[in-house]
Image (spheres, rainbow, N blue to C red):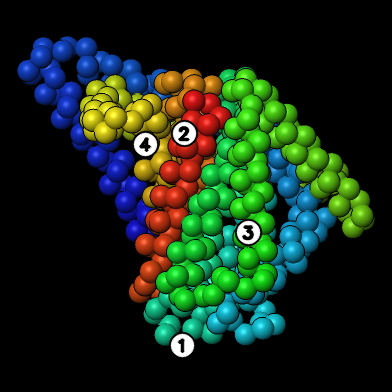
Amino acid sequence: MPAVMVLNYIWIAFFVIAFVVAAVKLIFTGDFDVFPAMMDSTFSSSKTAFEISLGLTGVLSLWLGIMKVGEKGGVVNVLARLLSPVFSRLFPDIPKGHPVTGSIFMNIAANMLGLDNAATPLGLKAMEQMQELNAKKDTASNPMIMFLVLNTSGLTLIPVSIMVYRAQMGAAQPTDIFIPILLATFFSTLAGIIVTSLYQRINLLNRTMLLTLGGACLLVAGIIWGFSQMSPDMMNRVSTTAANILLMSIIVGFIVAGMRKKVNVYDAFIEGAKDGFTTAVRIIPYLVAILVGIGVFRASGAMDMLIGGLHRAVELTGFSAEWVDAMPTALMKPLSGSGARGMMVDAMTTYGADSFVGRLSCVFQGSTDTTFYILAVYFGSVGIKHTRHAVSCGLLADLAGIIAAIAICYMFFG
């Protein structure tokens, strides 16, 4: 798939560029320490990757167990019903009452809850059903593109994995990025909807959409205004407290929903928790690969050269360049989730989990999704060759998420 090939080339580039930079430093500056440092980084990075993956097991098991309880308790179905009036207007080309609307709603609802294992099969099913309505089988239809943009904009209510990584990396309050991620991903999704609607000439000026999007914008504006009235210390305390209350409410709510559906909550939790161990084990090779590549790239001095160049370019404009150190995560995210995850972990390892760069990397990771990978998987599953405006809309949504993440992090942590 294209996204996988791009990651392949990037991974190779890490080693090749690192070797060239190290060789130049050795020949022209007599730096005999650069190659030993690169080899040391391969061992330390692989050890770090394994320790992180192993440490994720318990927390992943907890949250995947809770998610399974919510899934069986009908929470996804409730969200789907709530979203129905909105999505029926975003997909005007789909006949009213067509079965695909159910798959779309279920997929988006599952993504919002962070249920990746449930969301992907539902998404593939939705693409197959939309392909049945598609007159040009090799060309993406308008509903397909809107659906893909909603997926790539990364709207997630519960960024579980990011909070887990922050806890593993020693963050004092792993949930302090919860509210910033919600705000950043909102702007990413809003931009994706607006841009795609303009391309497809979908009328957003109707009562349902104005009430939904306008109400959401007012709510977000109110949250931002409220936090802007607080001191940085109070803002951090209120944000963290609100996030923890919301997360605990979700846990209790999922359990209550399971009880109401007469689900065996304990068994459902165990079923989901088992996936936590397999997930933690499954990511070990990916995390080792990307962290070793980044470690070699950084140890050679190539990362400092790249970031330093960006720093100087931004400083020439007169703006603060502190955010530049987190940009590798933002640039990698559209290409690869595992690659961006590695960049995020590297940023927290290098600068600290509670540093501005460490937090901004986490918000970058949560504000958008892997645009090219999602396009490759979903379009590839139904044989779509001509993607039309899907890539441009997806990337514009990513850009909005990046800009929003920077602004929001300066507000909360700057």
The numbered dot on residue 135 is: 1
User: Is 33 or 88 nearer to us in this picture?
Assistant: 88
- The mark nearer the N terminus, 3 or 2, is 3
Where's residue 281, x and y in %?
Answer: 57, 38
Of badges 3 and 4, the one in the foreground is 3
Placement of the N terminus among the 4 image quadrants = bottom left
Q: Count numbered badges in the picture.
A: 4
Residue drawn 67% across the image and 71% down it: 207
Q: Do the residues labelled 3 and 4 touch (CB within 8 Å)?
A: no
Q: Are marks 4 and 1 in contact (CB under 8 Å)?
A: no
Where's residue 291, x and y in %?
Answer: 40, 31
Up the image or down, 136 lies above or below 150; here it is below
Of badges 3 and 1, the one in the foreground is 3
- The mark nearer the N terminus, 2 or 1, is 1
Amino acid found under the numbered disc labelled 3:
Gly
Name the quadrant containing residue 302.
top left
- The mark nearer the N terminus, 3 or 1, is 1
Amino acid found under the numbered disc labelled 1:
Ala
- The mark nearer the N terminus, 3 or 4, is 3
Q: Is mark 2 on a helix, strand or loop?
A: helix
Report how far apart the C-alphas of labels 2 and 4 lie in the structure: 8 Å
Residue that label 3 marks? 214
Residue drawn 61% across the image and 22% down it: 231
Of badges 2 and 1, the one in the foreground is 2
Residue that label 2 marks? 361
Q: Mark 1: few, some, or many residues within 10 Å (few <14, many ≥20)?
A: few
